[in-house]
Amino acid sequence: MNFGQAIAELKSHKRVKRATWADGKFIVLNQGYPEGIAINKNTAVATGMEVGTICKFNPWIMIHGTDDSFSPWVATTSAVLAEDWL
């Protein structure tokens, strides 16, 4: 697949990955919280807002690492131009 096709898969709630990525490494689309969600202590500290404040979050792409953690992910130029998405 190309990157456009990979994005379409993400929007269909599928996992995608590059052929060269290690087993267990993939990206997903987090739909965000368009209606808002009460923030926890970590987010309160980061934003300077009170715990429990309702905040809206836009969608973002997350990468699942081989250590079973998730992180925000931004595509590199090589990822955008790649044709090896699965």
Image (cartoon, rainbow, N blue to C red):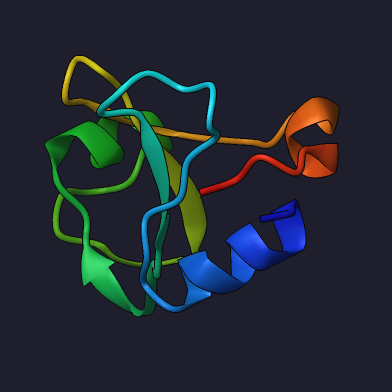
- The vertical placement of 16 against 45, above or below, is below
Residue 80 in the image, given as x and y percentages of width and height: 79, 42
Q: Quadrant of the N terminus?
A: bottom right
Q: Judge by depth and name the residue closer to the eye, 36 or 30.
A: 30
Q: Is residue 86 visible?
A: yes
- The vertical placement of 11 against 84, above or below, is below
Residue 23 in the image, given as x and y percentages of width and height: 29, 24
- Residue at 74% x, 63% y is 4
- The vertical placement of 74 against 34, above or below, is above
- The vertical placement of 15 against 24, above or below, is below
Q: Is residue 58 visible?
A: no
Residue 46 in the image, given as x and y percentages of width and height: 36, 31
Q: Is residue 61 left or right of residue 70?
A: right
- Residue at 37% x, 18% y is 22
Determine which quarter of the picture holds residue 42.
top left
Residue 20 in the image, given as x and y percentages of width and height: 54, 22
